Image: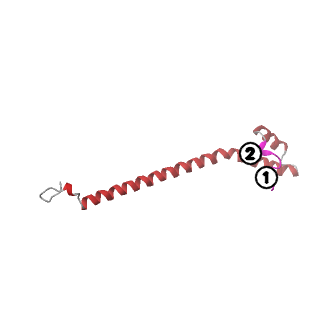
Amino acid sequence: MKNKDPYGLRKMSLEELCSWIAGHNEITSGGKAMNFLGKCELQRRMENPNALRSWIAIGISVIALFAALVTLSLKISDLRNQARNINHPHPSDITHGGSVK
């Protein structure tokens, strides 16, 4: 399996990572790639909280959508029951004269 972190950048603290980036400047031929890798790791760390927030927002949205669908289905069921009662009243609701109470 290919090593995704050959320089141990993910294990470094933020201060160590910044020092590592500063030590590999973009001017030298080998330093340019090292500097780029360090900046990528720094950006990954800065975007990590945003990714977590976005997954939490998606989860809350899914729960809200589910609740709305349940509420809608219950409302439709209630309306059907009301319509059924209007068209076919219960025998106890009919008075002796044939009209509905």
Seen from this angle, which residue lies furthest top?
A: 15
Q: Position of residue 89 (x, y in %)?
A: 23, 58
Q: Tell me the CA gap for discs 1 and 2.
A: 15 Å
Q: Residue at x 32, y 59 (%)?
A: 80
Q: Residue at x 65, y 44 (%)?
A: 49
Q: Specify start and end residues of the magenta stretch as a single range.
A: 1-11
Q: Residues within 10 Å of mark 1 (few under 14, many from 20)?
A: few
Between residue 34 and residue 67, name the one nearer to us: 67
Q: Amino acid at mark 1?
A: Lys
Secondary element under disc 2, as helix, strand or loop, is helix
Q: Is residue 76 left or right of residue 95?
A: right
Tell me what residue is drawn at x 48 percent, y 50 percent. 64
Q: Quadrant of residue 2?
A: bottom right
What secondary structure predominates along the stretch shown in magenta? loop
Q: Circle 1 is placed at which residue position?
A: 4
Which corner quadrant of the image does residue 15 belong to? Answer: top right
- Residue carrying label 2: 42
- Indicate the position of residue 73 as horizontal and vertical percent values: 40, 56
Amino acid beneath label 2: Leu
Rendered location of residue 88, percent (x, y)? 24, 61
